[in-house]
Image (cartoon, rainbow, N blue to C red):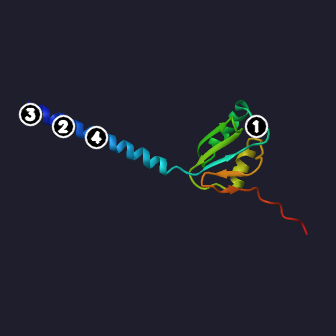
Amino acid sequence: MPQRSALSSAVRTLIAVLAFAAVATTAKAQTTSGPVYEFTVEGVVHQADAKPLVYALMEQPFATACSFIPECACFKVEANGPVTYAALRDAVAMDGHVLSGDVLVSDGSVLHAPQALDAK
């Protein structure tokens, strides 16, 4: 019987180590995710209207995740690094849409539309 007890103890230790490794990996994945950008698009207020744009945004090299939130009629794009307002504007425009307003960033900053320079 002592062998069985030792084996049981080894299995419990292995399970504990594996569980710890899984938790540590999950925690690391959560802390290394990129910035999240939240914005609205002119004329897109329903999930059905947003679906093609969600797919188009996921084709962008900076996007790691994208979703449309019907409650705020806004898009959330998780990126693999910093993204400029112009890059988001151009990505949305490729699908024939226009950003409507500023872009909120998960770090608390706000991306503003570039102001047109006055011709003098």
Question: Mark 1 is on which residue type?
Answer: Val
Question: Mark 4 is on which residue type?
Answer: Ala
From the viewer's perspective, is residue 59 above or below residue 116? above
Quarter-of-image position of residue 19: top left
Q: Mark 2 points at which residue?
A: 9
Q: In this view, does 79 lie to the left or right of 2?
A: right
Frontmost of labels 1 and 4 is 4
Residue 16: x, y in percent? 28, 40
In primary-sequence order, the first of circles 1 and 4 is 4
In primary-sequence order, the first of circles 2 and 3 is 3
Q: Badge 4: how crowded within 10 Å, few (<14), some, or many (20+)?
A: few
Residue 21: x, y in percent? 34, 44
Frontmost of labels 1 and 3 is 3
Q: Which residue is drawn at 63% across and 38% down?
A: 67
Mark 1 and mark 3: span between their CA atoms? 68 Å
Q: Name the residue under label 4.
A: 16
**Do the residues under discs 1 and 4 have CB atoms within 8 angstroms?**
no
Q: Name the residue under label 1.
A: 44
Residue 2, which numbered label? Answer: 3
Mark 2 and mark 4: span between their CA atoms? 11 Å
